[in-house]
Amino acid sequence: MVKDKDSAFFNVETDADHALPLHSGDSLDRHTRRNLRKEEIEIARQFHSGRMWPYVVAAWGCFAVWLSFFPLAIMGWLNLPLAFVLSCIFATGGYVTSHEAMHSNIAREGTKYRWVNEWVGKVSTIPIVFPFSMARLMHLEHHYHCNDPVKDPDYTDEASNMFAAWYKTWYNRQPGVDGSIHHYKRILAGMGTPAAEKALKDTMKLQLIFMTVLFAMAWSGYAIEAALIWWLPRHIGLSYIRFYLSWAPHHPREGKTNRYETTRIFKSRLGHVMSMCMETHLIHHLYPGIPNHRTKEAYFALKPILEKRGVDTSAL
């Protein structure tokens, strides 16, 4: 029995199979679908949980290294080109570790190490100036309303092709454009819950810290260092994240609201790891409790069932 919507068994035990919408053109009868569902769940259970400590080490370790870049730059002991490359990696990869924390995959609520889960999430999104409280709320809303043009917070990332998608990752962050974090703020303001109010306050605080650090370093003669350690890696990271986590696995979004259609299986030119393991993002939407690094393994185990469900598996 689940206790919260982002439980490891979200979309596993909470949905009765007969209530699930059919795949378009699905001719399977209710009995067949129910049997497939039971088989699917049993296979999926094998990939839940696992060793999560690497996410903790990566999150805290990378954050500590990134934080050290600032005093090292001021003291003149920093290899700036190397720091820039690493900062881009930390900014982008941080979303992966925070993503596991969003779904409480590192430690469940009420457990002894819950604080570890929360602090992994909190430090991971600082380089992209995206507070964990907002990131989690918006990501879970994306899960609950995936591809809904009104309710899905990430629907504004939709574009007709990959070139347009890369452009929108930049355009949506521009002042006055209802996209990206601007869109999130509007949604949070409309939610009117204590959690949404806290997320808005956290966003304001982190953005003030970001601007203060940039201004102080620029004023002190370290504008280039500030730009290459935080400002530019942040924008590169946000674009990379929005392309591979939002556009690539969900395109085309229009009309794709069935649980087996909300995401697509695709083959990335950069490979599985460099695409943040999003080639098999469908598995994450079906079973968020399966860690990101195990989604590909789970996909191949579930592939025969997914094909019977009507999922296009030709890409992988």
Image (cartoon, helix red, strand yellow):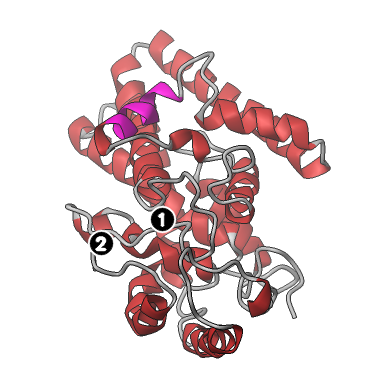
* Front residue of this view, candidates 177 and 215: 177
Is 267 left or right of 172, judged from the image as shown? left
Estimate how packed mark 1 is, as few (under 14), some (14 to 19) or many (20 or more) residues with alpha carbons within 10 Å: few
* Front residue of this view, candidates 12 and 69: 12
Query: Which residue position is annotated with label 1?
Result: 61
* Amino acid type, residue under disc 2 in the picture: His
Q: From what the image shows, is residue 301 above or below residue 141? A: below
Q: Who's the residue at 48% across and 57% down the image?
A: 262
Q: What percent of the width, then of the height, locates residue 283?
A: 44, 69
The quarter in which the C terminus is drawn is: bottom left
Q: Who's the residue at 77% across and 44% down the image?
A: 195
Which residues make up the magenta segment?
A: 164-172
Q: Do we see residue 128 in this rendering?
A: no
Q: From what the image shows, is residue 79 above or below residue 291? A: above
Number of numbered markers: 2
Q: Residue furthest top?
A: 219
In the figure, residue 96 lies in which quadrant?
A: bottom left
Q: Who's the residue at 28% across and 54% down the image?
A: 275
* Front residue of this view, candidates 74 and 146: 146
Q: Secondary structure at mark 2?
A: helix
Is 41 left or right of 301, judged from the image as shown? right
Query: Which residue position is annotated with label 2?
Result: 272
Is 251 left or right of 109, judged from the image as shown? left
* Amino acid type, residue under disc 1 in the picture: Gly
Q: Of callouts 2 and 1, which one flags the residue occurring earlier in the amino acid sequence?
A: 1
Q: Who's the residue at 42% across and 37% down the image?
A: 158
Q: Do we see residue 219 in this rendering?
A: yes
Let me know if residue 185 is in the magenta part.
no
Q: What percent of the width, then of the height, locates residue 21?
A: 60, 66
Q: Main secondary structure of the magenta part?
A: helix
Estimate how packed mark 2 is, as few (under 14), some (14 to 19) or many (20 or more) residues with alpha carbons within 10 Å: some
